[in-house]
Image (spheres, coloured by chain):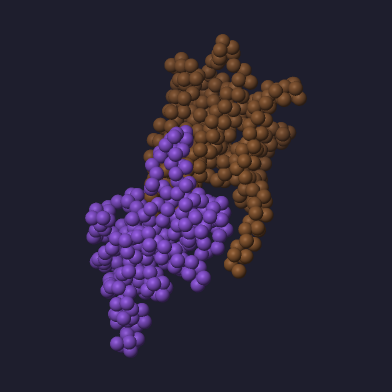
Amino acid sequence: MEKRRFWIVLVIAILVVIMPIFGKFLFPGLNRYILHVGTFMCIMTILAVGLHIFFGVCGQINFGCNGFYACGGYIAALLMINLKLHYFIALPLAVIGTGIITLLVGFAVLRLRHWVLALGTAAFGFAVFITLRTVAVGFLGGDDGLFTSKLIVFGKKAGPTFYYYFALAWTFISILGAYLLENSRAGRAMKSIRADEIAAQVTGINIEHYVRMAFLISGMYAGLGGALYAQWNRGVSPDSFTPDIAMFVLVYVVVGGLGKLSGAIIGTFILVLLPELLIPLKEYELLIYAIIFFLVIRFMSEGIVGTVQDLLNRRRLVGMEAADQYSQG
Amino acid sequence: MSFGGLQALQSVTMDVEEGLITALIGPNGAGKTTLLNVINGLLKADAGSILMEGEEIVHLPPHERASRRIARTFQILRGYEQQTVLESLMAGRHVNTRSGIFSCLCSLPLARNENKATKKAALEALDTFGLTPYADVPLPVLPHGTQRLVEITRALVSDPKLLLLDEPTSGLNPRESDVLLKALNSIKQTGVTTLLIEHNMRLVMDVADHVTVLNFGVKITEGTPSEISNNPEVIEAYLGRKFSAAAS
């Protein structure tokens, strides 16, 4: 089982790494476009994996991840423009900065739980969006946003291929981090909180601490996504960080399969790709998302990954039951 | 301890002797579970003190009491629904490990070694209670009795100094109760201090070294199982005055 999973992951990893080369040969005219979608997908995957840690693993709701995404993007852009820092220095600083903001927001918002927490975080997302549009226009750029300069790497101007691999590398790191976290002491503590807070407390788990830490990590993931976006997009503007983004990421995670890392990744892959394949229907994007969301909630409550796993496991469980009856005589 | 105007527990004083199994019995609503909740901090006592190895713990939040090795099972099975048996036992080792969240995220050597040790301890516990075949099975798929056994194993896997068991046989069939009795006897041999709430008197008489009886939030009496079973006050509390008169 473990071995099979390892091979699946390896094959997918190789496929996404060589994807641009194939793209070049198969669709020569579309290469830039494919890389664009690929890079965007990587950024969204990082956001989805971050939300997965807070929502899927720790069981708390966050409707405001566009806020942290924006923080990452704007901090990176501001550092590069005002302090003339190199992107490679601005990126980690943006992640740390977003982490600090997340902690501060967490002190207020994490006093809430369940649906009230959803409202609290959504309020943060909206607040950031509105702040960026209207407050300190001279500094934050208002509706126009901020523009960053070209990135020079090893004496060469960074192109779409560079950004794709750069984002992809960070995506791999993020996924690996989430995987390690999930299968560690902290991850198990978070899962216990999701399952039952009272039982978790009695096992010695400090709920407040772990919820705050999960929030922090998910915020830093979003910040990383934002920092990647800022340079790739050659700038940031409020339009890129609308509260819609928070909803999209939430849908990715739920449709893929809540509580499963692979669900967050596959959900993002399918739902980022889908509108691109249905470009004629672009106007109805939100409607299509909503329909998919409701269909999944109604008919596949475990999400895409969960449903597929259930189908694969059914045979195994039937075997177990037979063994059980046998042992009971 | 009181809920609004209702005094649920009133100046209950009891000792749980180290290394022994103390049973807490009493009719429904006597405050047994409330007492357990006060001991591990899920409910805050209005007054009084709780000493663990001579140290005051009454002001500590539940997770800190747990880290002083007080483990607990519940009357109604609680939680861990999406976890496999092995995972849930590994989560039970939380207080025995200390790697922080960032060391887990980056899988630093400390986190990695602890992970290995945790897995080993969990597998050993599975083996002790004959649960090894269920290691990778999600908890809700298991029969009720096995789930109960897993819950007790999860409490024991943290090497507790005090084990609080809230009606471990509730909802079990006789066959499952027997398995549980065996488990309790093996717990007794390992010398874990246990406080047991139980309605199944046969089981109490079998495993308990000491029995405390509660009724309406007040301690009626305590003593060895045989003393208790002949105490007229206890019979009255369970069966009413008429029967106690007949018995005496």
Q: Quarter-wise, where is residue A213 in the image? A: top left
Q: Count every numbered label the image shows and give the total.
A: 0
Relative to B182, residue B150 above or below = above
The percent coordinates of residue B83 (x first, y second) are 52, 51
Name, please, the residue furthest toward the front: B189
Q: Which chain is purple?
A: B
Residue A149 seen in render: yes
Can residue A106 be seen at all in this image of the molecule?
A: no
Quarter of the image where the N terminus of chain A is located? top right
- Left or right? Give the position of A206 relative to A142: left
Residue drawn 28% across the image and 72% down it: B222
Residue A211 versus residue B241 in the image, above or below: above
Question: Foreground: A245 or B95?
Answer: B95
Question: Residue A326 sits in which quadrant?
Answer: bottom right
Left or right position of A222 against A199: right
Residue at x-position 48% and y-position 69%: B177
Q: Residue at x 61, y 51 (%)?
A: A301
* Residue displayed at 56% across by 14% down: A153
The image shows residue A26 at horizontal and vertical percentages of 76, 25
Q: Which of the image's four quarters has the C terminus of chain A?
A: bottom right
In terms of depth relative to the viewer, which is nearer, B35 or A269? B35
Give the residue furthest to the top. Answer: A155
B100 vs B17, left or right, is right
Image spot of residue B69 (x, y percent): 34, 53
Residue B175 is situated, as x and y percent measured from the top left of the image, at 51, 70
Q: Is residue A229 above or below residue A185?
A: above
The color chain A is rendered in: brown
Outermost residue toward the bottom in this view? B246
Which residue is more in the foreground, B77 or A209? Answer: B77
